[in-house]
Image: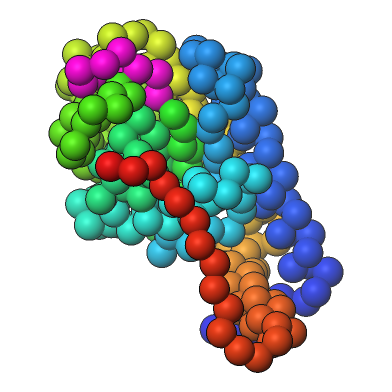
Amino acid sequence: NMASVDPITYEVLRARLDGIVREMEKAVFRTGFSTIVRESHDFSCGVLDKQGRLVGQSNHPTHMAAYPESVKGLLQFYTLDEMAEGDAFLANHPYYSGCPHANDMVIMTPIFHDSQVIAFAASMGHTPDIGGVAAGSRNATSRDLFGEGLQIMPVRYMRNYELVQDTASFVKANSRVPEMMIGDLSAKAGVCFSIGEERVKDAINTYGADTLLQMFEDLGTRTEQQARDLIAQWTDGVHESETWVDDP
C-alpha cells in the first residue's frame, strides 16, 4: 500500500467525490420522469469503491446505509471480471440489493481504469409502481415480501451503454406506469455514466489512480478513528434507546 495521502489532497478528493454525487442528484432531478423524483425527491446517488464501501455520499441517510449492501449483493451474482464498460445493473430485492423496501430500486455502474473495475457509481430511489395488488405497490394488508410487487435480484439493465431490451420488457410488464418507471431508471443510469463515471475518471487523470485508491483506504481509516474518538467521549455505562414500528 502507498503511504497515506497528504491532508490537503485528501480533503480535495473527499470534497470532489461528494461534489460528484451532488451533481449526479441534480441531473437525476432534471431528467427523471416521475413526481417521486420531481417533487418528492425520494432518490439519492453515491460513489463506492470496488468492494462496495461508500466513498462519496449524499444527505439521504437511509440510502447511504443501503448502498454498500447493494454492491455486495451485485457481487454475489456477477464477478468484476464479468463486468464491462457501459454495463448498468438493476436490483430491488431487499435481501440481495440492500434496498430498504421493494419500491426502492438501485442502479449500479462499474467504473473502469486500465481495464479494471476500480469503483461504482450508483443511484437509488422510490419507484412509482412495481406491480402487486395495490396501485403504487404499497399494500397495507401484505404479510410477506411477495405482496409488495416485483422483486428483482441483481440483473444487467444496460450493456455497452444501451438498454437491455429483455430486462426492460420484463420490468415494464410489471408496472402500472411502465414508461415512468423506465424513464426514472434510465435517468439514473445515464447520470451514473455521464457524471459518475466521467468525473471519477477526471479525478484519476488529475491525481492518478493510485492516489485516488489510497484516498479510499484513508477515508475508511479516518472515519473509523473519528467515530472511535466520538464514542470515547461518552459517559461510561449502559446506554439504551427505544423506537417503534407499525404493529403487524
Position of residue 99 relative to residue 26, above or below, is below
Quadrant of the snapshot with the C terminus: top left
In the rendered structure, the answer to whether residue 75 lies left or right of residue 2 reads left
The number of numbered discs placed on residues in the rendered structure image is 0
Question: Which quadrant holds residue 27?
Answer: top right
Q: How is the image coloured?
A: rainbow
Judging depth in this view, the residue of 36 and 204 nearest the camera is 36
Position of residue 104 relative to residue 211, above or below, is above
Instruction: Look at the image and say whether residue 134 sits in the magenta stretch.
Output: yes
Judging depth in this view, the residue of 58 and 85 nearest the camera is 58
Residue 152 in view (yes/no): yes
Q: Residue at x 41, y 64 (%)?
A: 51
Question: Which quadrant holds residue 102?
Answer: top left
The magenta span reads 127-136
Position of residue 227 relative to residue 14, above or below, is below
x%, y% of residue 11?
78, 64
Q: Residue at x 20, y 17 (%)?
A: 133
Position of residue 179 relative to residue 113, above or below, is above
Quadrant of the snapshot with the N terminus: bottom right
Quick one: which residue is furthest to the bottom in this view?
236
Q: Residue at x 33, y 58 (%)?
A: 72
x%, y% of residue 118?
47, 59
Residue 193 in view (yes/no): no
Magenta stretch, main secondary structure, is loop
x%, y% of residue 190?
49, 27
In the rendered structure, the answer to whether residue 165 lies left or right of residue 127 reads left
Judging depth in this view, the residue of 151 and 22 nearest the camera is 151
x%, y% of residue 210?
59, 69
Quick one: which residue is furthest to the front in this view?
247
Instruction: Look at the image and say whether residue 198 sits in the magenta stretch.
Output: no
Q: Residue at x 37, y 56 (%)?
A: 69
